[in-house]
Amino acid sequence: MERTISGMMGKGSVSHNTRAFSAKNVDVERSRNNIEFCHADIKEVYHKLFDEALERYNAKQKRSDRKIDDYYEKIRQGKQEKLFHEVIFQIGNKDDTNAKSDEGQLAREILIAFMEEFQKRNPNLYVFSAHLHMDVI
């Protein structure tokens, strides 16, 4: 059976991805099988990525009302940008590639290999949180 990795854009919920809470489609008994590739605090990531540029930007401003105190808060409170974008990669679906099946275990291995080099292949993206969920019903 041929498998492809497909991606889709999600709304994004870090607390759901880290399983800080479990939705109706999660079997909490299987959550221990999930894999966390990485997870960093998004505020700290923003400071790491943008503080130096923010300092240069603020230094050029003649008017104090144009200075930005905290770029993370500016984006969080703004209406035009999102703090982050989520992409979901999956192989198959719960009917033909569920986590309990042999196909699901193969998909797990493929997705692990896919994630191992993802950041290198996509240097213009910054992955701050990545999870493989093996607990979806």
Image (tube, rainbow, N blue to C red):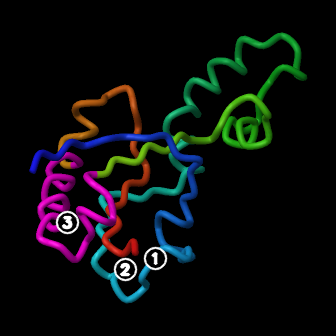
Looking at the picture, which amino acid does disc 1 mark?
Val
Between residue 47 and residue 33, name the one nearer to us. Answer: 33
Residue hosting label 2: 31
Looking at the picture, which amino acid does disc 2 mark?
Ser
The residue tagged with tag 3: helix, strand or loop?
helix
In this picture, which residue range is highlighted in magenta?
91-115
* Disc 1 and disc 3 in contact, CB within 8 angstroms: no
Residue at position x 56%, y 74% in the image = 23
Looking at the picture, which amino acid does disc 3 mark?
Gly
Spatial CA distance of label 1 from label 2 is 8 Å
Between residue 68 and residue 28, name the one nearer to us. Answer: 28
Q: Which mark is residue 104?
A: 3
Image quadrant in which the C terminus is located:
bottom left
Name above or below for residue 133 compared with residue 87: below
Q: Residue 117 appears in which quarter of the rendering? A: top left
Residue hosting label 1: 26
Residue 15's spot in the image, x, y percent? 56, 66
Between residue 113 and residue 48, name the one nearer to us. Answer: 113
Residue at position x 59%, y 50% in the image = 43
Residue 36's spot in the image, x, y percent? 33, 65
- Label 1 vs 2, first from the N-terminus: 1
Name above or below for residue 26 compared with residue 1: below
Residue 74's spot in the image, x, y percent? 75, 36
**77 sits to left or right of 64:** left
The residue tagged with tag 1: helix, strand or loop?
loop
Spatial CA distance of label 2 from label 3 is 15 Å
Name above or below for residue 97 compared with residue 66: below
- Label 1 vs 3, first from the N-terminus: 1
